[in-house]
Image (spheres, rainbow, N blue to C red):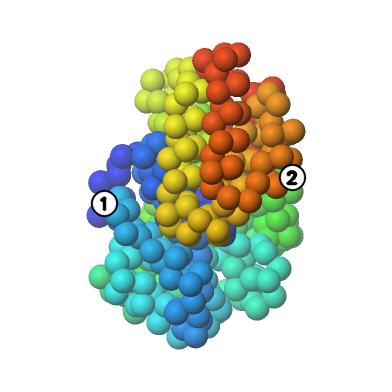
Amino acid sequence: MQYLGFSLRNNLFVAPMAGVTDRPFRQLCKKLGAGVAVSEMVTSNSLLYGSAKTQRRANHEGEVDPIAVQIAGADPKMMAEAARYNADRGAQIIDINMGCPAKKVCNVMAGSALMQDEPLVARILEAVVTAVPDTPVTLKFRTGWNRANRNAPTIARIAEESGIRAVAIHGRTRADQYMGEAEYDTIAEVKRRIRIPVIANGDITTPQKAKYVLDYTGADGVMIGRAAQGRPWIFREIEHFLATGTELPPPLVSEIHQVCREHLADLYAFYGEETGVKVARKHISWYTKGLVGSAAFRRAMNQLPDVPAQLAAVDEFFSRLAEADERLHYEEDLPEELAA
């Protein structure tokens, strides 16, 4: 797939997720089939550029192209400066966050709260596009502020007129947060109204659902977020299904054990062992959720204090699974926490 001047493996995107899509996770998703992985959002507040958190979020060392960095804020001048700052440090795509529903973001009129102020949206988009003329700028937003105000088609038109090169739309309003089911009619309407690429997002949890959403909306690609947590191989499953119409068999337990092990090693190296152990806990929980015996395992694992103990517990858990069945099988069709 050709996208903004880049030749992509496919039209599957990793959604930017705060606290999740760090460099180790982005690299893993790309290795397992994603065409593009967007970074977790970086603040537009220049006073925080030097913070350890911001520097980690902007770390793309060794990452496969394209390097897509998401910026968040509500001030056009600060957003323009943030775009230049990240482009100067290797960002090949600048993505603007107007989709995050978190209160701490919306309370300062950033994220999806911006959709309430269409003139401000236009000023921000124009400022960012002008600031980085040689770097494509994209926009992620929701269907609207609430169900009575689904103004995504208007925002999309503003985006296209402002020079935005592609948009990604989550099929919920800000008021919906992540509750209820995503709807795709609004995304389909946006696709009919604009000429730039449209990426559909929301509740894409299986290869079949990905095909359905692509067919229903006419979108140019799909973006997967929470369904990839603990299941980053979902991208190769979708890629295979879209290409062949057939499902891949469940992965081997031994392979996922190795995937998890390598991911943990990257986390320890990226964050340092002390913080890495803490960050790793949520990923281990996601990897094991829904598997036989995982509830007791997670309770014990979350108390483990260091890398050797954490790795030993992971090894024991997956070894026990492999003894029962060589392939990975969930106790349910899909863990509820992943179905979003």
Query: Which amino acid type corresponds to the residue marked 1 in the rendered image?
Result: Phe
Query: Which amino acid type corresponds to the residue marked 2 in the rendered image?
Result: Gly
Q: Position of residue 250 (x, y in %)?
A: 51, 20
From where the camera sits, is residue 86 visible?
yes
Q: Is residue 291 left or right of residue 196?
A: right
Residue underneath mark 2: 180
Return the residue nearer the eye: 291 or 232.
291
Residue underneath mark 1: 6
Which residue is located at x 51 percent, y 69 percent? 53
In which quadrant will I find the C terminus?
top right
From where the camera sits, is residue 251 visible?
no
Q: Position of residue 218 (x, y in %)?
A: 46, 40
Q: Badge 1, how many Cα within 10 Å: few under 14, some, many 20+?
A: few
Return the residue nearer the eye: 195 or 87.
87
Dot 2 falls on a residue whose secondary structure is loop
In whole angstroms, how far apart are the C-alphas of marks 1 and 2?
35 Å
Q: Is residue 36 left or right of residue 42?
A: left
- In the rendered structure, find residue 186 and report the number of the disc placed on it: none
Q: Is residue 114 left or right of residue 32?
A: right
How many numbered marks have been drawn onto this rendered protein structure? 2
Q: Are the residues at dot 1 and dot 2 in contact (C-beta closer than 8 Å)? A: no
Q: Position of residue 263 (x, y in %)?
A: 46, 43
Which residue is located at x 29 percent, y 67 percent? 90
Dot 1 falls on a residue whose secondary structure is strand
Q: Is residue 304 left or right of residue 46?
A: right
